[in-house]
Amino acid sequence: MENVKEKVHNQWETYADVALQGELLTKEQAIAILSSPDEQLLPLLHAAFRVRSHYYGKKVKLNMIINAKSGLCPEDCGYCAQSAFADTNVSKYSLLDKDTLVSGAREAMERKAGTYCIVMSGRGATNRELDKVIDAVKEIKSEMPLKICACLGILSGEQTNRLKEAGVDRYNHNLNTSKGHHDKVTSTHTYDHRVKTVENVKHSGISPCSGCIVGMGETYEDVYDMAAELRRIDADSIPVNFLYSVPGTKLEKMDELTPRYCLKVLALFRFMNPTKEIRISGGREVNLRSLQVMGLYAANSIFVGDYLTTDGQEATSDHQMIRDLGFEIEE
């Protein structure tokens, strides 16, 4: 029995070696991670930490979101409480004014976040909305040493060029799921629409941020395909969300995640995208629960504060969690 345990332990270390050599895990290896027995979780995280620490040491990047425009989205994404197809009680408001967006940036600084994320609901920003965001970004960049990440939906190449000129450092547009699973999640836009926006972002010279949502009924193969596609499009920052099933949404009854499985997913994403920022994102508190801190052995970034329509834990609790682990905030 001991020889079997040692063999599996060496297997995870071999995967770490593959990642550090810049090579891609196979789908079979990915499935071995996701389906591994829970008693192998600590050796698996140890191997993932070897890769994480090689590129990021014990630094943790903090990001903060502002929900700059909420609700009334015409898309039918099954996970989203802001969809017009969902029967939820989320706040509905148009784009916040410039002063409010700038004030949010100051709050991000107080929470020790290095990146401030301006996020809008909707299929994509109108040029008028884009003008408002650009005005706020220019003021923020003139006052504060923050990275700005915009998340404004599907954009054209011309629009992404304007954001670049304004000083936007990063643009988020999540692939959300695999190409094969996409139609089970939404029907009002295609998977290729999402990929095209990420390509527009890259072409404009903005750092691409793109990630996924785990827990929407996808298979192990789908999770591998997500990680592999994010590697292919060369996303610099990869937010890994874990479904927070909100009542009134299409996926309200979906509840298939455990904290241990979430940790295995994070380990896989670290092996698959070893040099990239892996961020534990929406659903962290609900799905990882008391094991949140263990996620940082694979991931090197988290959100602080609230998410778009769900609450996060207090920023001071996140700061303490990082200190308790012996890690440090990258300010």
Image (cartoon, grey):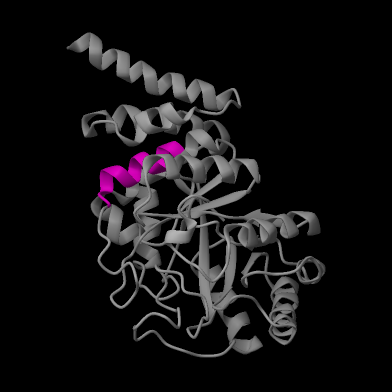
Q: Nearer the viewer, residue 99 or 48?
A: 48
Answer above or below: position of 87 versus 276: below
Q: Nearer the viewer, residue 282 or 27?
A: 27
Q: Nearer the viewer, residue 115 or 14?
A: 14
Q: Which residues are magenta?
A: 257-268
Residue 32's x, y, as percent?
A: 35, 29
Answer above or below: position of 244 versus 53: below
Answer above or below: position of 153 versus 325: below
Question: Looking at the image, which residue is at 62% across and 90% down?
Answer: 97
Residue 89's x, y, as percent?
A: 34, 86
Q: Is residue 265 magenta?
A: yes
Can residue 294 be seen at all in this image of the molecule? no
SS assignment for the magenta stretch, majority = helix
Left or right of 138? Residue 20 is: left
Residue lying furthest left in this view?
Answer: 1
Q: Is residue 298 magenta?
A: no
Q: Quadrant of the N terminus?
A: top left
Left or right of 160? Residue 70 is: left
Question: Looking at the image, which residue is at 38% across and 80% down?
Answer: 86
Question: Looking at the image, which residue is at 32% across and 51% down?
Answer: 292
Q: Quadrant of residue 120?
A: bottom right
Q: Quadrant of residue 276?
A: top right
Label total for image: 0
